Each structure stands twice: as structure tokens, then as C-alpha cells.
Image (cartoon, rainbow, N blue to C red):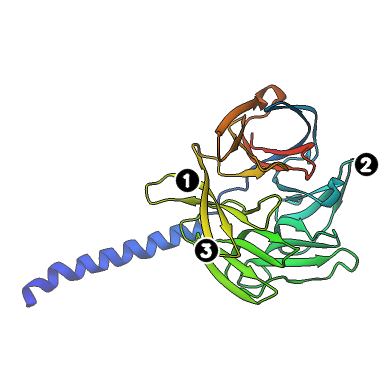
């Protein structure tokens, strides 16, 4: 037995040192910088099965991170996450008619993914930094007071609220899964694993949610989850690398790949409708459409 000690001991020490120094190097490596993005607002004109965009304006208009636009009820303003001090992200509100920009959260923490309740009196967002769990918070517009919005301890990355039913679907930051919460009944339901990091959506004109799922054969699908019977149904496959999308008021899907806009539905698939390169855009990563479908917010990543 002693013949093997001189061989294995140095090897174990070497492996241990490699693990130790590699862990130090990983810890010392700074996180990748937040992308420099801008949010553009367009007026939308529908022409048969296609669309035309006009009256483009940059509503964020500053160097740094501006992302995750959300149209408030009645489409009077747009909420978005922005990093204005180079340190953290806060929630801002852009008023469409007056073209005024107003900060809504200025905390020591990071806030993302802003949304509002149906009455526009409460703002919800993902907050990171106040406790070990990155989760959904809500803030009263009148008082400015905020508190945790959900009882789940699962770290939340993205979410979609149905404020009429007090339920939501969220994507787990580390688990890469989607979970359904019924806040009224205080129940939690695991929906699916292998979920792509993309914001779930509330499907127009019903109470179902959509999310993006990578199947075992590596194809990526937008799928629907029905909270009533807990079933999942495939809607449309995504043939590309950008997994963000939005719903039109008539129940069609809108997504971008590079600078090209695609409009699609379950029956006819995807169709190219417009190239945004002519507006000076470089790579569209996110989209948000107003509830009446007449305005489109686009996030461009130069």
C-alpha cells in the first residue's frame, strides 16, 4: 500500500491547489457589464396582414441600460428599468403625451420588470438585494411604500400577473422553471422545467399564460398554460436566438430577430413584416405593445 502514497498524494495536492486557485480567479472576475440599450417608441399602422411603423422617438435617450418596457393601463405612460447612476437599476415612467420622464424607485436595491395593477395604483417589480431571495415586490403609488408581493421564496427572474384573478406565472432565476401562484387560494403549482429565461405573458382575452420552453429535442416553443385544468399546449416554435415576444390585442404574436419583425399565429406560423434597420436600429431584444395595439416600444442593443 505504501508504494502508492508518493504517487497519489502529490496528485491530490495538485488537484486541490488547482480547484483553490480557480475558485479565487472566478470570484475575482467581475460580472459582465450590463448591456447599453435604448428604448424606442413607434406609432403602429395596420395594413391588412402587415404593419407599418412611423413617428419613432428615443424615450430613454441616455448611455447605459434601459430595458423591459411596460405600457400602463390606458396606455398613457411606459414603465421601464434603467441604470442611471452606473450602479443599480431603478424604475422610471415615461409619459407619452408630455414626453416627461419620472423616477419611481430610488432605493439602494436593484429593481427590474415593472408592471402595474389594473387600476394603475400599485406598481410591481422584481427587487434584488434587500434579502437573499430576489422576488416580486409591490409599491403603492400614493404612499411610495413597498412590500413583498408573493409568499414564494423561489428567486424570481421574470413574471406575469393576472390582477383580475390574483394569480401569476413566474420564471425561476436559478431553476430555469416556471411556477404558477394563486394568491387568493394561496397555492403554488410547478408548471415546467427547461424554461427559457423570457418573461411570461398573459394571453389576451383569456386567463391563460404563455411561456418559452426548450424541449428535449432542443426545439424552443412558445407554450400556453391553462390555470384551470393545469394543461400545457404548444403554440408556436421559435426559429432563432431571440426568445422575447409580445401579444397583439387580436391574439397574434410579435417578435424580432436582429432588426426583422415577425408576426405569427398558431395557424399560419411566422411571417416577416418589417425591417427596423431603416430606423437606425441594430439588434432588437425586447418588444412591448400597447393594449390598443397602436404603439410599439422596442429595445435596441447596439
Callout 2: few (<14), some (14-19), or many (20+) C-alpha neighbours within 10 Å?
A: few
At a point 72% along the width and 68% down the height, the residue shown is: 166
Coordinates of residue 107 in the picture (x, y in percent):
77, 63
Nearer the camera: disc 2 or disc 1:
1
Q: Secondary structure at mark 3?
A: strand
Q: Is residue 209 visible?
A: yes
Cβ atoms at labels 2 and 1 below 8 Å apart? no
Quadrant hosting residue 168: bottom right
- Return the residue at label 2: 98
In the picture as drawn, the residue positioned furthest to the top comes out as 278
State whether residue 267 is above or below residue 28. Answer: above
Pointer 3 or 1: first along the chain: 3
Distance between the alpha carbons at the discs numbered 3 and 1: 16 Å
- Return the residue at label 3: 191
Nearer to the camera, 47 or 245: 47
Coordinates of residue 291 in the picture (x, y in percent):
78, 45
How many numbered circles does the render carry?
3
Q: Quadrant of the C terminus?
A: top right
Q: Which mark is residue 220?
A: 1
Q: Secondary structure at mark 1?
A: strand
Q: Secondary structure at mark 2?
A: loop
At a point 86% along the width and 62% down the height, the residue shown is: 121
State whether residue 149 is above or below residue 235. Answer: below
Callout 3: few (<14), some (14-19), or many (20+) C-alpha neighbours within 10 Å?
A: some
Q: Which mark is residue 275?
A: none
Pointer 3 or 2: first along the chain: 2
Quadrant hosting residue 103: bottom right
Q: Quadrant of the N terminus?
A: bottom left
Amino acid at each position: 500500500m505504501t508504494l502508492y502514497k508518493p504517487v497519489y498524494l502529490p496528485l491530490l495536492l495538485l488537484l486541490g491547489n488547482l480547484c483553490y486557485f480557480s475558485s479565487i480567479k472566478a470570484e475575482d472576475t467581475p460580472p459582465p457589464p450590463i448591456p447599453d440599450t435604448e428604448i424606442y417608441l413607434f406609432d403602429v399602422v395596420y395594413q391588412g396582414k402587415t404593419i407599418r411603423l412611423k413617428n419613432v422617438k428615443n424615450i430613454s435617450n441616455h448611455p447605459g441600460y434601459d430595458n423591459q418596457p411596460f405600457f400602463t393601463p390606458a396606455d398613457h405612460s411606459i414603465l421601464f428599468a434603467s441604470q442611471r447612476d452606473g450602479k443599480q437599476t431603478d424604475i422610471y415612467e415615461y409619459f407619452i403625451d408630455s414626453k416627461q420622464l419620472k423616477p419611481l424607485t430610488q432605493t439602494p436595491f436593484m429593481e427590474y420588470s415593472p408592471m402595474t395593477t389594473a387600476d394603475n395604483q400599485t406598481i410591481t417589480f422584481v427587487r434584488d438585494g434587500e434579502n437573499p431571495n430576489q422576488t416580486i415586490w409591490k409599491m403603492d403609488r400614493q404612499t411610495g411604500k413597498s412590500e413583498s408581493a408573493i409568499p414564494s421564496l423561489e428567486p424570481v427572474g421574470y413574471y406575469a400577473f393576472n390582477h383580475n384573478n390574483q394569480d401569476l406565472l413566474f420564471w425561476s432565476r436559478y431553476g430555469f422553471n416556471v411556477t404558477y401562484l394563486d394568491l387568493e387560494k394561496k397555492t403554488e403549482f410547478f408548471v415546467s422545467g427547461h424554461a427559457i429565461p423570457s418573461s411570461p405573458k398573459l394571453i389576451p382575452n383569456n386567463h391563460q399564460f404563455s411561456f418559452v420552453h426548450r424541449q428535449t429535442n432542443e426545439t424552443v416553443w412558445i407554450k400556453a398554460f391553462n390555470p384551470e385544468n393545469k394543461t400545457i399546449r404548444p403554440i408556436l416554435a421559435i426559429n432563432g436566438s431571440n426568445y422575447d415576444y409580445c401579444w397583439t390585442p387580436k391574439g397574434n404574436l410579435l417578435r424580432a430577430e436582429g432588426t426583422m419583425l415577425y408576426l405569427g399565429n398558431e395557424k399560419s406560423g411566422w411571417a416577416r413584416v418589417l425591417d427596423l434597420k431603416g430606423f437606425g436600429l441594430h439588434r432588437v431584444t425586447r418588444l412591448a405593445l400597447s393594449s390598443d395595439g397602436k404603439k410599439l416600444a422596442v429595445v435596441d442593443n447596439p
